[in-house]
Image (cartoon, grey):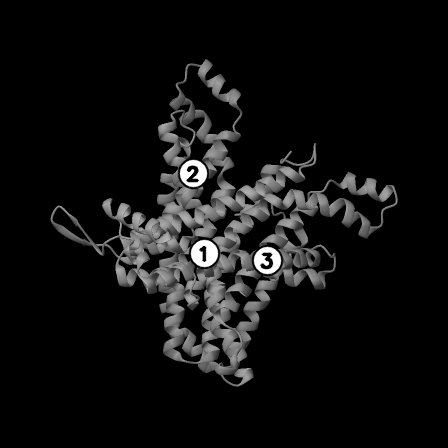
Amino acid sequence: MTNANILPASTQSRLPWLFGAVIVLAAIWLLADLSLLSTLVEWLPYLGSGFLMNVLISLLAMAGGTVLGVVLGILELAPLKIVRYPVVFYVQVFRNAPHLVLIFATTYIFPFEIVVFGHYLPFPDWLKAVIGLAIPASAYVAEITRGAIQSIPTTQWEAAKGLGFSRLQALRWIILPQCARRSLPPWMNLFASITMASALASLVGVHELLHAATDASTAVRRLDFTVLAYVVVMTAFFILCYPISSLTRRLERRMKA
Amino acid sequence: MENSLLQAFIDWTGKIGLHYEFLASGYEAQIWRGGFITTLYLIVLLIPVSLAFGLLFAAMLTSGRKLISAPVRALIEITRNTPTLVQLMFSFLVLNTFVSNVLGGAQNNPLSPFFWVVAIVGLHVAALHADAIRAGIEAVPEQTVEAARAIGFSRLQILRFVEAPLAIRASLPAIVNNLINLVKLTTVGNAIAVSEITYASIMVWTQRDNVVELMIVILLFFSAINLTLARIGHWIEKRLAVPGFGVGS
């Protein structure tokens, strides 16, 4: 979660080329060994379904984490200590906890099915992983929101009060709309980081990309295919995360200027 | 004395429905203690490793020669945009197998899973450090460098006396952030059976079915380490603060 990384324009424009060169090299390697290519084509749908799971987990975790996190961020600035302290404690503990630990926690603590009005609903592992990632996401979003609210000059609160807005109305109509713009770059950073953390779900047996690649390489049992499978995994994550992070950098630079 | 304290803790937590009885048993308590020690050992080892390589990478990055800076740039982008777990699995399953094949069999391979965790997490965080230090060097005002040049400083002297001291101050918050990240990243060792705290905990809770109890301790453990790190970072920032420069002052 570091920001303030401004690349010189020359390297920025060269990187996609470098990346393109890697893809061309991989293509040549595949064409040189057609049996490898056919094995890869055979397994691609399986890997693709795994990657969809990664996308699903990260989107749901970010959606849940954002809703909860914005509320927590506002509560972190509540005037009442009895509200503020538990929220600050929650944010501190879960922001400092490794994602993997939280995924283990939700996976092993929650039951495998829940009873709602006498109906047994299954509670699948991937949903538990979503919750396990939504918890740290909410803690991060809370800090982002708190920072954004605090970055708005206090004179705006006073002006709103002078116009007859209540505290909540001022927050809703004047402060939060400005926060949304300011917190977009760190929020996108977090999104990329949660997307990458969704790979940790493979350790609790969720069928996602890394898990699929491990399955594929144990089934095929060829070292060159194993290499290729993991290169595909890395490439998939890179293609998803690189545009997000370069867009974030561009936004950050524009906001600073 | 120690045993009676432990017994009092077990009795007291038992009353509120938490089961820490395993702490009194020899074997599982020993596994768990070993997990904590391994995690702490990883952290203590990784902080200097990541800082040393971070400085090296930052020097390469700002050398001004494309041949030297391009590989580091590529490493930073790969590190930033792919999951650490995937990097670890890739190097353990692929690079480690290559090393084994070259040395003629896995029994000759001296590289342990522990080594791979240190190497991957260390390089990963070092790349993030390097980027932070580079941003710090770029944050040094142009006029300051010009002024140093005007009073006859050589390029090396400017780096040593002007750029480096200011860059370290500017990048310190980001470096502390990376170190906190590093502490959290040590848990990926779980994937390749390094017996750090999450791995040890799984061994305990499969026997005792006390996930909640272990989780409370683990969460407090990581919070304590990271809060301590943040405190130390903040203290150093304050000690080094130059009046009138940066946000730390």
Secondary structure of the residue carrying tag 2 is helix
Residue pointed to by mark 3? B50
In the drawing, what numbered circle is on residue A142? 2
Residue pointed to by mark 1? A196
Contact flag, marks 1 and 2 (Cβ < 8 Å): no
Residue in the foreground of this view, choosing between A140 and A165: A140
Residue B148 image point, x, y percent: 82, 42
Give the vertical position of B105 relative to A105 (above or below).
below
Apparent side of residue A71 relative to residue B148 in the rendered image (left or right): left
> Do marks 1 and 2 both belong to one polypeptide chain?
yes
> Do marks 3 and 2 both belong to one polypeptide chain?
no
The subunit letter for the residue under badge 1 reads A
**Label 1: how many Cα within 10 Å (few below 14, some 14–19, many 20+):** many
Q: Which amino acid does label 2 sit on?
A: Ala
Q: What residue type is labelled 1?
A: Met
Residue A243 image point, x, y percent: 52, 53
